[in-house]
Image (cartoon, helix red, strand yellow):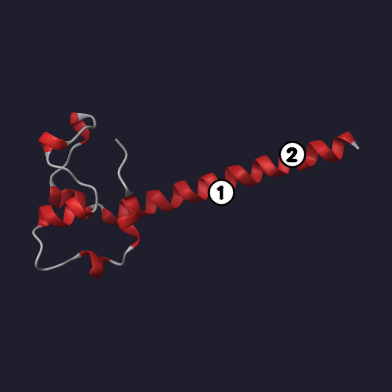
Amino acid sequence: MPYDYSAFDKPTDEKKDSNLSTEEQARAMGWRPRKEFKGESDDWVEAEVFLSRTELYRRVQKLNQENRWLRKQVENLKKQLQKKGES
């Protein structure tokens, strides 16, 4: 099950709330305890590890969004070139 990575867009200071436990912070960002985790069992990590990977997840999300945008641009260019060739 994919995570909702939107919480990773917040600056690191905003994500860390001293009143919340590590697990509560991780849960707020999409982490789930092992018994609630619905992905591959080898993909599950402890809350501390999940939180330590926040920057990595944020970077992956940003690159995925950029990749989707670039693919759309390529498709648009292909369509324009096809129209140009037909005329």
Q: Position of residue 56 (x, y in %)?
A: 31, 52
Estimate how packed mark 1 is, as few (under 14), some (14 to 19) or many (20 or more) residues with alpha carbons within 10 Å: few
Q: Is residue 45 left or right of residue 84?
A: left
Q: Which residue was labeled with disc 2?
A: 79
Residue found 31% across the figure and 57% down from its top? 8
On screen, 66 above or below 19? above
Q: Secondary structure at mark 1?
A: helix
Amino acid at the residue labelled 1: Trp
Residue found 29% across the figure and 35% down from its top? 1
On screen, 52 above or below 76? below
Mark 2 / mark 1, whichever is N-terminal = 1
Q: Secondary structure at mark 2?
A: helix
Q: Is residue 10 left or right of residue 69?
A: left
Give the quadrant of residue 11.
Answer: bottom left
Q: Which residue was labeled with disc 1?
A: 69
Q: Position of residue 3 (x, y in %)?
A: 30, 44
Q: Position of residue 6 (x, y in %)?
A: 35, 54
Mark pair 2, 1: CA separation: 16 Å
Give the quadrant of residue 9.
Answer: bottom left
Where, quadrant-wise, is the C terminus in this rendering?
top right
Q: Position of residue 28 (x, y in %)?
A: 20, 54
